[in-house]
Image: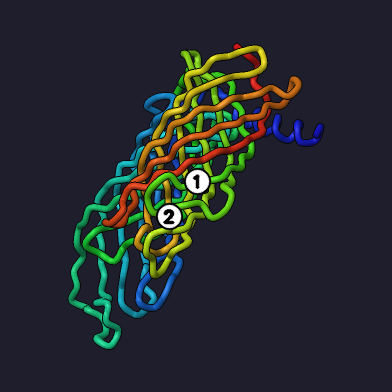
Amino acid sequence: MRTLSILLAALALAGSATAQRRGRIGPTMSIIAFEDERGTHNYLSWGATFALLSGDEGEIGLAASRYADLSSSTCERQMTFFGAESNYYPVGAGGIAPFASTALGLARVLDQNPGLIPLGCNTSAAASSEIGFGFGMGVRLNFGSQVAGLLEGRFFQVPNSAMQTLEGRANFSFLLGPPRESQIMSGTLGPTVGVLGRLSGAFEGRGPTLGVRFRRDTKKAGSLGLQLDYAPLRVTSSCTSGCEPFAIFFAPGYEPSLRPSWGRIYADLGVLLAGFPEKGDDRGMAQGVHGGLGVDILSGRSLMWNLNTRVLWMQRATASDRDAFLLQAGISLSPAIESR
């Protein structure tokens, strides 16, 4: 138990809230998974990102990426993407900072593959300009006051083209400008496990959820919470393929609290993003809200147990039975936060 306390305390210290410099700039590398008639293929891309913190929880920026070769045949397929990006940091941008990302921009696409291999390449195909968008989740790791690294997984799509992909991105940034003082106070994080029960809709849990829970107090009333879960699911309605998908839940929330001497009682309300990485009707991101109740119970002076239950609502990508309601109950262990 002492070793566990030391490890959790080290994680909490790594995630402590500090003043962050306002800007960052640096190169971005990605691995994109592209599916065509030949199967699934992975390709590298390179680019750069410039971003500015707009608040404790927000960051906006510009990014450019070059996908020089996306072809699994002799046909030429490439893309250049210029876009505006937004990262949402529900527990602040300091230390270890998870985030949800969105991107919207212009994709310049050249695709000589007509989709029918016997016909060969369409060498007369011209590049076209399309709107592209992406959304995903990631974590920012700050190394002192000068350098930050970002790891992100996202879904990326360019309508009116064959670009519907999963992408893993890594960014190395130099931090610029004067520090921006945060309104967020000390925080903690720890592993969590839970169960899912079906309320209505076509989804139910087929195993325990596993993840991590973050919490930060603010100088204002209440706390900011975030829970990331790996959730194995089962489709309960008529299904022919992909009947046991898994999802990644990203659930930030605001937690107004009461603070008795033994811990904390709180309500939780926030948005819900559910990413479905596997190919199928639901591939992509479902969105919704979550709300519930929880307690933090102090265990000695260094550890804290969290018990919570909440209702999850999300809209699926499929046209039928779009709304899914689930009940999640969970337990988590993390380093204790001193009472304000």
In the foreground, 52 or 34: 34
The quadrant of the picture occupied by the C terminus is top right
What type is the residue that disc 2 sits on?
A: Phe
Q: Which mark is residue 276?
A: 2
What type is the residue that disc 1 sits on?
A: Gly
Q: Which mark is residue 197?
A: 1
Please tell me which of labels 1 and 2 falls first in the chain: 1
Q: Position of residue 222 (x, y in %)?
A: 49, 18
214 shown above or below 286: above
Rendered image coloring scheme: rainbow
Q: Position of residue 233 (x, y in %)?
A: 49, 55
User: In the current view of this chain or complex, which residue is farthest to the bottom?
Assistant: 118
Q: Can see residue 89?
A: yes
CB under 8 Å between callouts 1 and 2? no
Of helix, strand and loop, which one carries label 2? Answer: strand
Left or right of 314, for residue 91 = right
